[in-house]
Image (tube, rainbow, N blue to C red):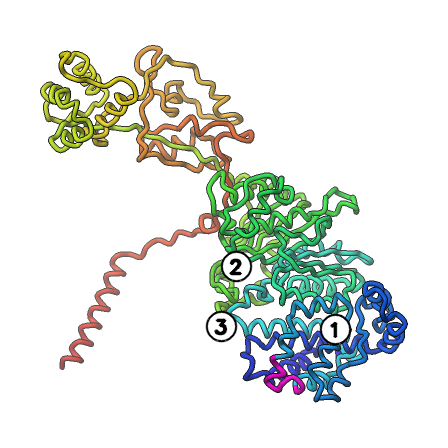
Amino acid sequence: MTPGNFQQLANFIWSVADLLRGPYRPPQYERVMLPLTVLRRFDAVLAPTKEKVLQRFASLEGKDPQLIDRVLNELAKDEDGKPLGFHNHSQLDFLKLKGDPDNIVQHLEQYIDGFSENIRKIFDRFEFHAEIEKLAEANRLYQVVAQFASMDLHPNRVDNITMGLVFEDLIRRFNEAANETAGDHFTPREVIRLMVNLLLEPDTKVLTQGGIIVTIYDPACGTGGMLAESQNWIRAHNEEATVKVFGQDYNPRSYAVAASDLLIKGHKDSRIEYGNTLPNDQFPDMHFDYLLANPPFGVDWKGEKKEIDRWPNFRGYNGKLPRINDGALLFLLHMISKNQSWKEDDRNKPGTRIAIVFNGSPLFTGGAGSGESEIRRWIIEHDWLEAIVALPEQMFYNTGIGTFVWVLSNRKEKHRKKKIQLIDARERFTQMKRSLGNKRRYLDETVIDDLTREHGTLTESKTSKVFDNIAFGYRRVTILRPLRLRFQITQEAKERYLDTCPELLDAILAVEETLGGEPYYDWNEVWGKVEKIIKVLPDDIDGWTKGAKGTAQKKLFRQVFTEPDPDAEPVIAKLHKTQKLDTEALFPGQSLPELKSDEIYALLGLYIAGKGKHVEYEPDPSLKDFENIPLKEDIISYVLREVRPYVDDAWIDRTSLDEQDGGIGKVGYEINFNREFFQYQPPRPLAEIDAELAAVEKRIMELLREVTA
């Protein structure tokens, strides 16, 4: 059987699953079919050297199990005479299992226990012993085993490439049957093809060289689909290449499937490990040529936080980590830590390329200074982000939300240096005839080829744009406006104040007698009068108490007897001598517009109040706002253009210009696809809308007449 006609075998194995109907629902078929497919393949692969293994085992029986494994794993060989890296020393095989239906349960378990430790570990993760009991109770175990015994999966009949294709097809079918959870460990094949193209196509010239060795890693490998597709791409372009793949997954069944797939294909030098990638890296000292992953969307990392917080850094990243309810970016940090060092024309420092699938959250969640923004900043300022492709919605089995493929590299081509390409593929989908869970759309091969070409050629178009790295950075600057208070003594306000400060009744009456009950629009002037009135009160009338209590009395007085009013005068916070501002220190490295000194002072909240004096107003907390000013613009010009024309009394909070990390203010990074690809659609003419409404009303009236006639 050749790779071209593997479908016949896959269809036959799929048909055997009908025997499970009853004790199993279709989404549960994989619990039996995948382990038995693996088991039957192992049985066929081991058959040629089985007798030699049994003879050698007889001489080793009773010795250290690890020694037995080492010796017999080398003795069990494939059709080319290469050690398989696993063995089975049981006297049983599938034909003997089929020949003794009365002892099928006992013999099948004995057969599995006869495998080397690496295979037994896989079947432990499959939890297959529990399925054996369930099948036996339903009287289906022998029927299913007998069907598998009739399959000829010998390497002379089905080579490793074909068997790998059969296994991948079965994984796809079982996951589609279980589409309500398939997205947890299964990425749609066309998405993987696109990711692999974006990852590997730029290196076609290198990857087609004879004798090349390539390492690929997926830290959330699921059933191994991305690793398999990467191998297929390289194999199609270079049969002489040696591809070593590595993966890790926390789902035991997914791990077992991926590990089995590697062994079925004969990849002895590759490894799939079980465990939680974030706190428990199974490849701590390894670096890879290519990395790709589809980590969980929006999954919290609360369980890992306690351990991670004890680390001096997270995989070499010393900045702030993302919020606890979404750990997707932690996977990217982990992948970046696996980068090969890069140096041009140095084969020992080849660099690394990365492709990863995210939802929209890592693009823009979190403002300047947040963990997400700091991670984006770290990546972009190191010039690692190469491209992002926005995929259509409804592409995944377990979610309909929009998704994005990020491509990163620490060895960008010269024409990509300091640039990021955004490709919008959100409308370039084909509708599926039948939905699978939330998956209702897919990318056809033409679209995948077009997207790969747009990325490779750095094309500029309506759906592909290229930006300088700095275009996604901004400074978060605080904008303040003056507090404006209207003062008025009313009966209600007086009662509120005296409820708290009854001892000041006579003082408040004295203030009321002088100022009356009319409103005042200049708190600065009013407060001067109030202070003067209180100061000259007779000795038998209590004024402000000294110390903290007096401060509280004054604060409550303003709070009770004033209301914000846009027509009132600004409240003065302080009046001080003019100090020369060092604009170069405030705005380092910025080319500022030519302005008079008093204009710059006003933009910073310092207003002329006579010769040599400046007044500083108290800001209104309710009017406090923030502006995200692009890094490529100077702050003054931006405020003059985007703020002052709309609120002419606004000023820049000088404290928000404090230098941080060598920049001005708090720096953030975000990537907003909607903003970059937004195309304005003018509203339709009102006459056209009115005509449509009139036509609808006319139709409604006609229908009503038909009903009432």
141 in the magenta segment: yes
Q: Residue at x 41, y 36 (%)?
A: 627
* Kind of residue sitting beneath label 3: Ser
The residues tagged by marks 2 and 1 sit, at their Cα atoms, a distance apart of: 46 Å
648 in the magenta segment: no
Based on the displayed image, in which of its 4 quarters is residue 141 positioned?
Answer: bottom right
The quarter of the picture where the C terminus appears is bottom left
* Kind of residue sitting beneath label 1: Asp
Crowding near pointer 3: few (<14 within 10 Å), some, many (20+)? few
Q: Which residues are magenta?
A: 134-143
The single residue placed furthest to the front in the displayed view is: 62
The one of 146 and 114 positioned closer to us in this rendering: 114
Query: Residue 19 placed where, x, y %?
Result: 60, 85
Report the disc number at residue 391.
Answer: 2
Report the disc number at residue 435.
Answer: 3
First along the sequence among labels 2 and 1: 1
Crowding near pointer 1: few (<14 within 10 Å), some, many (20+)? some
Query: Residue 355 placed where, x, y %?
Result: 62, 54
- Identify the secondary structure beneath mark 3: strand
Q: Residue at x 42, y 26 (%)?
A: 654
Report the disc number at residue 113.
Answer: 1
Q: Is residue 525 above or below residue 366?
A: above
The residues tagged by marks 2 and 3 sit, at their Cα atoms, a distance apart of: 17 Å
